[in-house]
Image: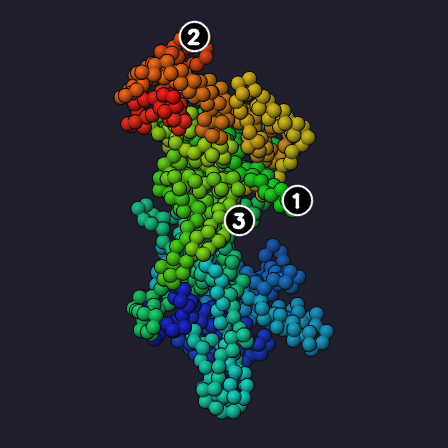
């Protein structure tokens, strides 16, 4: 349990920030005021200042003593760390001296010290760093500043003025600690870690705005104008009691414009989903970064944070200094390491041997088939779906034409899987999520509109209005997998329009007007309304989704559970083999033997995708452009005879993205003609069922764009004519009580039966819905009246029919 408030040395309650009470008291970066210390002097080391937070440092006039209660000899620590900086060698060179030389050339001010290097060089010094970071880190700052000045900056000084400027310049250099020996999870933190240096992994879920944190206060005497600076001690600003010049008491006032401030931010870190034990909810911890660490991470980033674990007391009320016995904990950030998969792609240390292996794979003639087989190898067949999600994983080439005034075109490919239950849709989503660069897996049933995008809430402690990022924002530059897509509420469906096409999310709530990036590909899975897919109805009717959302998917696959005795037998054999083989490698070997295709292991596949996304940016060749034009025109001309739209410009853009993704799979910087042909094939396979008009049996893109096919609209128009003629010919039957709906449908079907042989109207089983729609249109015109149930009304003659 943390010590009581009078022994903890934490900042007093009246000086704590109102935002969460997570301000650090005498943090590692300001415990001994390293930014104001003299590089070559000893005044800052011999101040004799005592801190309730840290062990007392006993000093004498002639020699340096250790901190009370520790074995820390400051002068010995300085010598050991100085030796480490100058003598540690990595890769055959003086590693940290080389890093300092690069900092000198790049004008940066953070030297990252690898904890594993320090552990290897001096285990005792490493252990002191872990157990007493508040004392050791400022000493490290002083040493690195002195080395930086002596060995680099002072050599460039030509006079005393430049020497003083370089001395001040060196004081800006700070130490960052990375790669500690032990890395813990958020739920593993406990009281024994307080005031120690720790390393924690997690996902950033919220970042606050920046706040100014005072590190030195400036007071001015109101009588004589004398100015004095006061450093922050234990989180308190001690106002001078009397003026040093005029001796007047209580004459000082705080001059804010002359005070020194540093940037401060509040970040909330949540443990990674894959590390949460079954049945538990994710835990969070608050981070407080300062200076160069602010605005270094964003929501959705997977990071490793190194910092000092601290506890801060909580006031019972804001107006009283009485503290609770419960403490808030937070991490005083020393350094970040981004471990989001996007950053892993950018910074993945691929050795020359690994690179040669990836290049060798890309040159294999059957690399495309190998990649397809490597996607969810436990799922039997479904090669067409696997090809689509494989293209989604690689993605197209980003196109930014803002300077030319043409805007930005998305390179991400959206895929929708629609079909019967128990057809491996969710397994494919899980597989893609594990291979995606970055993203969130969520369910449409458990996700609201704000949960998918962004929502405005109040901080539970500060009551300030803050923005919380949803699944699409957290999946920026990755893939958002949404299961049960059909069960989303109407608001969630509406909000997806902007996110899926413009890839931004606009917010105008509670005085906050902002536009957030949602550059994510969407992989969704949906079940039909009646559990089983009805082939007699369109996709829009089966899953009850707005056609404007469906039109934003590049590929829509129908995954149907069709009866086929031979196929069922092979599927059962595949599943039984999967359960009978204990060794995973034996199972993969058997799949390779059956398909005569090499299966790429998951780690290599992930590296392959990472390398392609970060290094391969294919461009269209002239042959590929001509083939795209011909393919698009051919798709459009297929509907000329029936006056239907079989392709739109969105399909052309989808073909471009698919072609680029296929080129990436081969590490090809050029999109060739055969890539376009394969993209057209994938598009036709997806459209063949998704955009199929059940009335005519032909592809009609109006089904996805408007929810209505051209044949359906023509049928309704013809039914309006037939209904009008029927009512006029039998006007007496439609007076008074009118005609029952099903009797009326039977009469219309009788008329249609005579026309069916002539081919005017096809399947009369589809007529009931179209008849009802035609009646509602005639009701708006005043030709009929429809009392009773809107879906089964009685039909009476309207005013226009009686005229």
Element type where label 3 sits in the image: helix
Q: Residue at x 38, y 34 (%)?
A: 486
* Depth check, front residue: 113 or 641: 641
For residue 430, above or below residue 764 = below
- Give the Cα separation between the discs numbered 3 and 1: 29 Å
Quadrant in which the C terminus appears? top left
Q: Position of residue 631 (x, y in %)?
A: 60, 25
In the displayed structure, 537 sits above or below 666; it is: above
231 horizontally vs 102: left or right: left
* Along the line of sight, the residue nearer the viewer: 610 or 295: 295
| Furthest residue in direction bottom, as rendered | 247
Per the image, the residue denoted by label 2 is 757
Q: Earlier in the sequence, mark 3 or mark 2?
A: 3
567, 389: nearer the viewer? 389
Residue that protrudes farthest toward the left in the picture = 737
Asked if labels 1 and 3 touch by Cβ distance under 8 angstroms, the answer is: no
The residue that appears at 43% across and 76% down in the rendered structure is 236
In primary-sequence order, the first of circles 2 and 1 is: 1
Q: Which residue is mark 3?
A: 343
Q: Residue at x 36, y 56 (%)?
A: 188
User: Left of 316 or right of it: where is 430?
Assistant: right
Q: For residue 780, say whether it is visible.
A: yes
Select label 3 or label 2 by which is in front: 2
Q: Which residue is mark 1?
A: 404
Give percent across and percent down for residue 546. 43, 34
- Locate residue 428 relative to residue 732 in the image: left or right: right
- Badge 3: how crowded within 10 Å, few (<14), some, or many (20+)? some
């Amino acid at each position: 349990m943390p010590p009581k408030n009078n022994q903890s040395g934490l900042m007093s309650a009246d000086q704590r920030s109102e935002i969460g009470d997570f301000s650090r008291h005498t943090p590692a970066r300001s415990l001994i005021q390293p930014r104001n210390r003299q590089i070559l002097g000893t005044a800052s080391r011999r101040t004799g200042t005592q801190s309730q937070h840290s062990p007392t440092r006993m000093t004498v006039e002639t020699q340096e003593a250790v901190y009370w209660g520790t074995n820390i000899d400051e002068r010995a620590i300085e010598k050991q760390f100085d030796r480490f900086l100058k003598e540690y060698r990595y890769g055959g060179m003086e590693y940290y001296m080389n890093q300092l030389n690069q900092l000198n050339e790049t004008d940066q001010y953070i030297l990252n010290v690898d904890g594993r290097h320090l552990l290897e060089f001096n285990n005792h010094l490493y252990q002191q760093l872990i157990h007493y970071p508040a004392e050791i880190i400022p000493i490290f700052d002083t040493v690195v500043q002195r080395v930086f000045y002596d060995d680099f900056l002072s050599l460039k000084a030509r006079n005393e003025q430049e020497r003083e400027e370089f001395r001040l310049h060196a004081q800006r250099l700070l130490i960052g600690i990375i790669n500690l020996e032990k890395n813990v999870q958020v739920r593993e933190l406990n009281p024994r870690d307080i005031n120690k240096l720790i390393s924690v992994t997690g996902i950033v879920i919220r970042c606050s705005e920046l706040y100014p944190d005072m590190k030195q206060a400036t007071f001015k005497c109101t009588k004589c104008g004398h100015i004095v600076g006061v450093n922050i001690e234990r989180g308190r600003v001690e106002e001078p009691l009397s003026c040093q010049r005029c001796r007047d008491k209580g004459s000082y006032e705080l001059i804010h414009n002359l005070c020194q401030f540093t940037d401060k931010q509040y970040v909330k870190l949540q443990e990674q989903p894959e590390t949460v034990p079954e049945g538990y909810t994710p835990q969070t911890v608050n981070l407080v970064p300062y200076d160069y660490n602010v605005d270094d991470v964003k929501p959705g980033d997977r990071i490793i944070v190194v910092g000092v674990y601290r506890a801060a007391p909580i006031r019972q009320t804001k107006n009283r200094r009485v503290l609770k016995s419960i403490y808030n904990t937070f991490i005083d950030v020393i350094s970040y390491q981004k471990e989001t998969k996007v950053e892993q792609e950018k910074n993945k240390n691929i050795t020359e041997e690994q690179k040669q292996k990836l290049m060798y794979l890309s040159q294999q003639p059957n690399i495309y088939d190998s990649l397809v087989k490597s996607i969810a190898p436990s799922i039997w067949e479904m090669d067409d779906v696997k090809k689509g999600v494989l293209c989604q994983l690689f993605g197209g080439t980003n196109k930014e034409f803002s300077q030319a005034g043409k805007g930005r075109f998305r390179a991400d490919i959206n895929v929708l899987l629609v079909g019967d239950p128990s057809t491996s849709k969710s397994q494919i989503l899980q597989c893609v999520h594990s291979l995606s660069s970055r993203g969130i897996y969520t369910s449409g049933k458990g996700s609201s509109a704000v949960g998918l995008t962004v929502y405005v809430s109040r901080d539970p402690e500060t009551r300030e209005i803050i923005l919380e990022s949803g699944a699409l924002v957290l999946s920026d530059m990755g893939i958002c997998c949404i299961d049960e897509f059909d069960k989303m509420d109407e608001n969630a469906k509406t909000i997806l329009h902007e996110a899926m096409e413009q890839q931004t999310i606009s917010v105008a709530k509670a005085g906050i007007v902002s536009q957030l990036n949602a550059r994510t590909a969407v992989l969704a899975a949906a079940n039909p309304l009646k559990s089983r897919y009805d082939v007699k109805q369109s996709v829009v009717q089966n899953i009850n989704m707005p056609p404007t959302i469906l039109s934003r998917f590049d590929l829509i696959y129908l995954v149907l559970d069709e009866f086929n005795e031979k196929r069922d037998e092979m599927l059962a054999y595949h599943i039984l083999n999967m359960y009978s083989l204990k060794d995973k490698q034996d199972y993969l070997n058997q799949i390779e033997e059956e398909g005569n295709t090499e299966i790429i292991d998951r780690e290599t596949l992930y590296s392959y995708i990472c390398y392609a996304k970060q290094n391969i940016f294919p461009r269209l060749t002239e042959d590929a452009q001509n083939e795209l034009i011909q393919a698009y025109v051919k798709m459009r001309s297929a509907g000329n005879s029936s006056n239907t739209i079989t392709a739109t410009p969105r399909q052309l853009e989808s073909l471009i993205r698919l072609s680029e993704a296929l080129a990436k799979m081969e590490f090809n910087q050029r999109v060739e003609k055969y890539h376009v042909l394969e993209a057209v094939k994938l598009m036709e396979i997806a459209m063949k069922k998704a955009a199929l008009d059940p009335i005519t049996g032909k592809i009609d893109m109006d089904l996805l764009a408007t929810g209505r096919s051209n044949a359906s609209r023509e049928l309704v128009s013809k039914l309006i004519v037939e209904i009008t003629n029927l009512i006029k010919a039998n006007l007496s039957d439609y007076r008074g009580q009118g005609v029952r709906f099903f009797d009326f449908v039977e009469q219309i079907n009788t008329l249609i039966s005579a026309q069916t042989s002539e081919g005017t109207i096809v399947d009369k089983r589809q007529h009931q819905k179209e008849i009802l729609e035609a009646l509602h249109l005639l009701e708006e015109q005043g030709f009929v009246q429809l009392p009773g149930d809107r879906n089964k009304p009685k039909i009476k003659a309207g005013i226009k029919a009686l005229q």
